[in-house]
Amino acid sequence: MLIIIFMAIILFIADLVLGSVIISLKDFWEILQTQGGETYLHKILFNFRIPRALTAVAAGMALSVSGLIMQTVFRNPLAGPFVLGISSGASLGVALIIIGFQAFGWFSAFTVLSNWAIVIAALLGSGLLLLMLLIVSTRVKDIMTILILGILFSSSVSALVSILQYFSPEGALKSYVIWTMGNLGNVTGDQLFILWLAIGIGIFITLFNGKRLNIMLLGEQYAQTTGVNIFQFRLLIFIATSLLAGSVTAFCGPIGFIGIAVPHIARLIFKTTNHFILVPGTLFLGAAILLLSDIVAHLPGSDRILPINSITALLGIPIVIWIIFKNRNLSQVF
Amino acid sequence: MVNNEGYIQLNDLSVGYETGRQQRTVIPKINLRASQGNLIALVGANGSGKSTLLRTLAGIQSPIKGSISIDNKPIESYSRHDLAEKLSFVGTHYDMHAMMRVHQVVSYGRYPYTNILGHLHPTDKMIIRKAMHDTGIFHLRDAFISEISDGEKQRVLIARSLAQDTNIILLDEPTAFLDVKNKFEILHLLGRLAHEKRKIILFSSHDLQIVLGTADLLWFIDHKKIIQGLPEEMVLKNTINELFRHSEVYFDAENNEFRIQRRHNFCVRLLGSGALYKWTERALDRLHIKVDNRCSGPAIHIEQKDQEIVWTVNPDNKGDEFFALQDLIQHLHSKYGNSKQLR
C-alpha cells in the first residue's frame, strides 16, 4: 500500500514537471518556494499543470472506486462506473447542448457559457438516467435485472445521440467527438473545487458502506439475513457512483477503461476482497494510473497532446494482460 | 421450562410470489411450529415451494397471507438487524466470491454485532474460531474459497451462520451438488448442532433417502399441503409414496430405497439368502426378470464357493452353472425370453 501511495506521489510530481515544457526539478523546487512569482514557468505550473494533475488524481480515484463498487454490487467482473448509464446520460446532455445549440444557430450563446454549460448538461443527463434507474429499482428487486435495464437505457440513449450526430453540422460533430475523447485540462478554480467536493462525498459514502460491501460478496440473500437493508444500501451506492463517475464525466468527458481495470489490478496486488483495504488501494492506484496516462498523453518534450481516453486504454490494457498472464486466471480472483 | 424455549410459529401462513399485480400462492394456510433442538427437513418435489417457504421464513420475501412469529413476537416487529440475531440463512454456495478466505467468510457472520468498520473484538474472534472448530474447518481457515471442495464450502457457510449466533438456522438445499459421503456428513453435522446447541435447524432437501436417516422431523410438502411427522412414520404410513403417485418410482420401505416399477418379461424362482440374494434380485429386476417364488419358471440357486459366486439354473436337473451375473441373465433371456406362460 505504501509503495502505491509513494508511486502516486512520484507520478503526481512527474505530471507537474513533464509536458510540452519540461521543468527541471531544481526549477520546480524554486517555483514552489517563491511566493507570488510571475515568471513564465510559475504561470505554467500554477495555471495549468497543478489543476490538471489535481483533476487527474480526482478522476483516477473516482472512476476506479466507482468501478470497484459497481463490480461488487452487481457481482460482475465486467461492471464499471458506467453500467448504470451515467456516461450515456451525460453524452446525451452534452450532445444536445453542443449539437443542438449549433444546429439552431445559438452558437454564440453557447461559447459564452461553454464550460459550465457542458458540465451542467452532462450532470443533468446522467442525473436523469440515474433517476429513471432508481425509480425502476424500487419495483425490480433482482440486481441482475437492474444491470440489464441500465445497459438497455444506455443503448437507447446512445441511439438518440447517434441520431443527433447524424443531423449535426460538421463543426458541432467535431466538438462533440473531442468531448468524448476526454480532457483533464479544462478544470480550474471553482470547477476543480466542485469536482473534489463531489468526489470527497462519494468516497466518504463508499467507506461508510465498506462493511456492507464486504458482506455483499456473499450475495444479497446473505446480506439481507445478516441485517443489511438492501434498498437503502443500493440507494446510497447509486448516489455515490453518480457523484463519483457523474462529476468526472461532466468535467472531463467519459474516460474509459480505468474504472473497469483498476479494481482488478488492486485485487490482484492486495490479494484480498476486503473493501477497507481495496477502497484505499483502488483510490491511489487509480490516481497513479491516470497520472501516468496523462504524462504519456502529453508526450513530454513535444507540444502535441493525445486524447486521454486512447492513452488509458493503450496503457492500461497491456498492464491487465500482463497481470492476467502472471496470475493465469482473472475470474479466479474475482 | 418449555415456555422459555425459542420457537418459530407459522400461523395460517400462505407463501408464494407476486408477478406484477398477480399473486401466486404456492402453499396456502400453513400452521406449524418448530421448537429448539430439532433438525427438520423440508421435503417435496421440485417446484413444490420449498425455497419459497424458506425465503419467506428468512424474511427475504413477504408472506402473501398469515403470519410468522419468532419467540412470541411477530416477524414484522423485528427490525432487519434484530431478526439477524434470531435467524440466519444458508443459501447456495456456488456463487461465493472465490478470493475470500475461509475465516473471512465466517467472520461475516458477526456482521450484526460489529461496528461500522466491522471491527472484531476478542469475543467475536473467539466465536469465529469456535464456529470453525464446530464445523471441522479450522485447519482450512486461511485457504481461499476457490481452493476448497464443495462439501467444505458448505461447512464454511454453516460456520458463518453459527458465528451469527442465532437460535434458528434455515438452509436451502445444503446437500445439493454434494457426493453421498458429504451429504451424510453435512446432515450429521446439522443434527449434532441441533441437538447439542439446542438450535432449530430447518433445511430443504430432495434427498429423501438420506433425510430419512438423519432428520428429527419431516415437513412433507404434498399437493400444496405440509404434513408433519417423524420420518419413520412417514414411511410406515406410506406418505412418502404420495410423492410418486403418478410415476414409475416408488419407495421401498423394507429396503429404504427408491425403486422403479418395471415391466417384467418372465419370472424365476431364486434360492439363496443375504446379500447374494438381494443383489441378484436387484439385477434381475432391473433387467426385466421378476423374482417370484410361486413362479413356475426356472429356479436359480446361488452359493458362494471359495472365492467365487456360482449361479446354478435348475440345480435339481444339474443345470448350467454361471460365474458371472451378466452371463446368467443373458442365458435366461435367450432361453425364456419368449415363453409367454412364464409371465
Image (cartoon, rainbow, N blue to C red):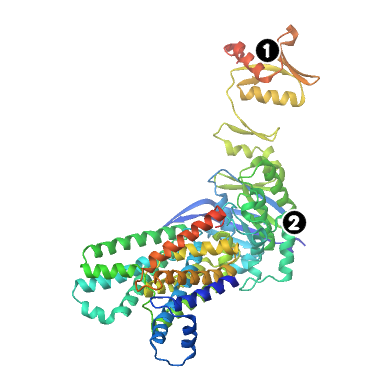
Amino acid type shown at disc 2:
Asp
| Chain letter belonging to callout 2 | B
Helix, strand or loop status at disc 1: loop
Query: Position of B323 compared to B96: left or right?
Result: right
Depth check, front residue: B43 or B4: B43
* Residue receiving disc 2: B134
Q: Quadrant of residue A131?
A: bottom left
Disc nearest the viewer among 2 and 1? 2
Label count reads 2
| Chain letter belonging to callout 1 | B
Q: Quadrant of residue A127?
A: bottom left
Amino acid type shown at disc 1:
Pro
Image height of A210 relative to B38, above or below: below
Evaluate if marks 2 and 1 touch, with contact meaning CB atoms under 8 Å apart. Answer: no
Helix, strand or loop status at disc 2: helix
**Where residue A276 appears, x then y in whole percent?**
59, 70
Query: Position of A73 compared to B79: left or right?
Result: left
Quadrant holding the C terminus of chain B: top right
**Where residue A79 appears, x then y in whole percent?**
46, 60
Q: Residue at x 21, y 64 (%)?
A: A167
Depth check, front residue: B5 or A92: A92
* Residue receiving disc 1: B298
Q: Quadrant of residue B20?
A: bottom left
Do tags 2 and 1 sit on the same chain? Answer: yes
Q: Which comes sooner in the sequence, label 2 or label 1?
A: 2
- The CA distance from mark 2 to mark 1 is 57 Å
Depth check, front residue: B228 or A159: A159
**Where residue B331 appears, x then y in whole percent?**
64, 13
**Where residue A268 appears, x then y in whole percent?**
56, 61
Q: Is residue A132 visible?
A: no
